[in-house]
Image (cartoon, rainbow, N blue to C red):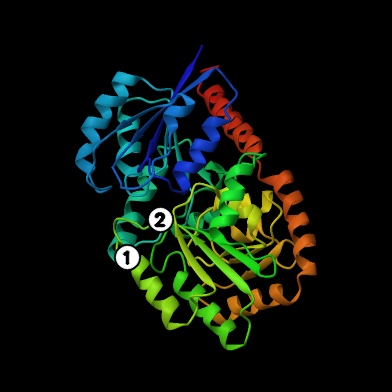
Amino acid sequence: MQYKVIHILGTISIGGAELALFNILSNWQDQSFTHNIYYTREYEGVKVRFEDIGITVRPLNWKNEREFYSIPTLIKLFRKERPNIVHTNLWTGNYWVITAAKIAGVPIILESVLAIFQHKKIGNILHKILRPFIFRYIDSEVCASKLIVNNLSRRFGHSRKKFTIIYYGVPNEYHLNAAMLAKLKEELKSDNNKTVLLTIARLVPKIKGYETYLDALRILNERGLTNFDTLIVGGAQKDYPDYPDFLRKKIKEYQLEKNVSLLGYRPEKAELLELSDIFVMPSNYEGGPTTILEAMRAGKPVIATRTGAVPEYVINGETGLIVDPGDSIALANAIEYMLKHPEKWQSMGERGKERFKENFTIDKTVNQLTDLYKSLLSKKGLK
């Protein structure tokens, strides 16, 4: 017997949840499951190519995640498709998906939470009211970190019995394209005498912490530390079209033109990591950032902020350095420490690589999720 799984995503444009699911389905081994994806909205930007791994992707054509009136359409969809499992990866939209799945008689309903809920005051009130009702209908809440479990349990009084912690890992191996690497070296005019700092994150104001990052680099500049190159890789977002220009103005204002390069979206992540010395993630808000795991896999030390699953990924002082989000002085101090102690890079990077292999490979993620699906099917008598 084959079991049908329907995954619900907010978009198929490149993002954390989308790449996490792509990695999972790319490495899925159990042929007794089939997977289909429905996504709520279209976004500009580079799309995750699920079709390359044989996964059918269909739009739901929502305008936003507040479309509670989509419930009848979802009920009709689930009754037609008759999935054994609905696994949803939204925010507010989870309420409508879970309600519809329950009414349609879907045997197993799961919700993934990759980051801590952040809403304005009215949103927090609505979630406080709605979540207890919805939580009773799900069979498992799949959380990307212990921090998320603690947050949901504390804020909404959820029973910990329904929580399952699964770290969303990345592929165990990666392959460098020699021609691409050589071309990148030429393009960036890589200077072996300079330390290369790499950041990979969407160009989003405040959330990704670029303001703090540039301020930290300004502080380093004022301290006379300029022997580094900073590569910022991330595409401009439709909702913030002027943000790249804002960052360029800050770079000029802080006299960092010789030290900072905005590269836009680049697909050559493995090659960029190969050219870098230290990976920096200055975010104010994260869930389970796979870019940190990719840096650890490549044997790079990490400087990151204490947010989301980061403290569960990075061991402060052993595989990298962790600072408080929004603290430009602390971030500057961490970068300065690394710049002045290059002998730490190799040992931190090696320990980080070992930690990745032990805890955060995609094989481990896939095995845990497969076991969860099978366990829930068994409990419902669907062996």
Q: Secondary structure at mark 1?
A: loop
User: In terms of image quadrants, where is residue 316?
Assistant: bottom right
Which tag is nearer the camera, tag 2 or tag 1? 2
Which residue has dot 1 on it? 120
Within-10-Å neighbours for mark 1: few <14, some 14–19, many 20+: few
Q: Secondary structure at mark 2?
A: loop
Q: Is residue 97 above or below residue 370?
A: below
The x, y position of residue 11, in whole percent, is 35, 42
The x, y position of residue 171, in whole percent, is 62, 39
Return the residue found at the far left: 69
User: In terms of image quadrants, where is residue 50?
Assistant: top left
The x, y position of residue 217, in whole percent, is 55, 78
Q: Amino acid at mark 1?
A: Lys
Q: Which sits earlier in the primary sequence, circle 2 or circle 1?
A: 1
Which residue lies at the image location 64% right of the left edge and 80% below the top edge? 333
User: In terms of image quadrants, where is residue 76?
Assistant: top left
Which residue lies at the image location 34% right of the left edge and 67% below the top edge? 243
Which residue has dot 2 on it? 235
Q: Is residue 317 above or below residue 172?
A: below
The x, y position of residue 17, in whole percent, is 46, 45
Q: Are marks 2 and 1 in contact (CB under 8 Å)?
A: no
Q: CA distance from mark 2 to mark 1?
A: 26 Å
